[in-house]
Amino acid sequence: MNHTKDRIAKKVVEYYAKFKALKREDVLHTQEVVAYTRMIAAGEGWDDKKTALIEMAAWLHDIGCPRSKEIYGNSLPVNQQNVGREVACELLADVDELSSDEKSWLENVVGTHHQYPKAVEYDFLPLFEADLIVNVLSGYHPKEKAGHLYNTMMTTHTGRVLFKLMTD
């Protein structure tokens, strides 16, 4: 699974490199989300296979942003999620090491990664919480909303601890 995870990461970086308007911060955001996702999954006791799969999802989660910016002029969550699902499908098409169910799960995660109810339904809370932490730290969400976000959307023990450590 680690070889597949590395292959997905490489595909994501290569995909991002095709877009001239891509900022270094976009790639750094993805790397931060991957790191926090791994920490939360490990802290919650996820096994190696499930952790590798959620890390793949973390690498892919914002893959719709560059194309969304070209199509819509922005990367608002609804736009990047719709486009992201399509791009994820394209990038995963030749990844034979993943089952069709795993590919479908990854595509669903990318297509819903900003939606808390879907994070619960599809079981990707480590990614959802990691993205939320990084978005708060980067100013995407105002600091004044941090308490509300913590109380309503941070539900894993590890995610709550990391959120507090990083935002207090």
Image (spheres, grey):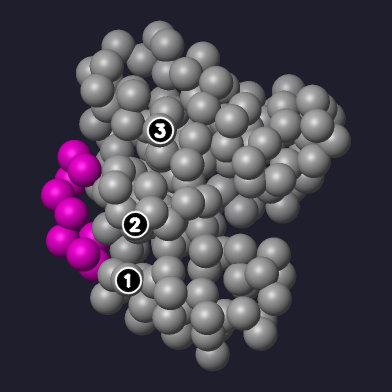
> Percent x, y for residue 109?
41, 39
Q: Is residue 132 left or right of 159 when viewed as pictured?
A: right
Q: Quadrant of residue 86?
A: top right
Q: Which residue is mark 1?
A: 155
Task: Tell me if label 1 and label 3 are in contact, CB under 8 Å.
Answer: no
> Percent x, y for residue 132?
52, 64
> Percent x, y for residue 59?
48, 40
Question: Where is 6 relative to 120, above or below?
Answer: above
> Percent x, y for residue 77?
64, 46
Residue 88 visible in this rendered orientation of the protein: yes
Q: Which residues are magenta?
A: 42-50
Does the magenta-highlighted stretch encompass residue 49? Answer: yes
- Measure the alpha-carbon separation of dots 1 and 3: 21 Å
Q: Amino acid at mark 1?
A: Thr
Q: Which residue is mark 2?
A: 125
Under circle 3, the secondary element is helix
Q: Quadrant of residue 5?
A: top left
Name which of mark 2 and mark 3 comes first in the sequence: 3
Residue at left 79%, top 25%?
Answer: 71
Residue at left 56%, top 22%?
Answer: 87
Question: Where is 63 relative to 14, above or below?
Answer: below
Q: Which residue is mark 3?
A: 108
Does the magenta-highlighted stretch encompass residue 131? Answer: no
Q: Residues within 10 Å of mark 2 (few under 14, many from 20)?
A: many
Question: Where is 99 relative to 53, above or below?
Answer: above
Residue 40 versus residue 2: which sits nearer the camera? Answer: 40
- Measure the alpha-carbon separation of dots 2 and 1: 8 Å
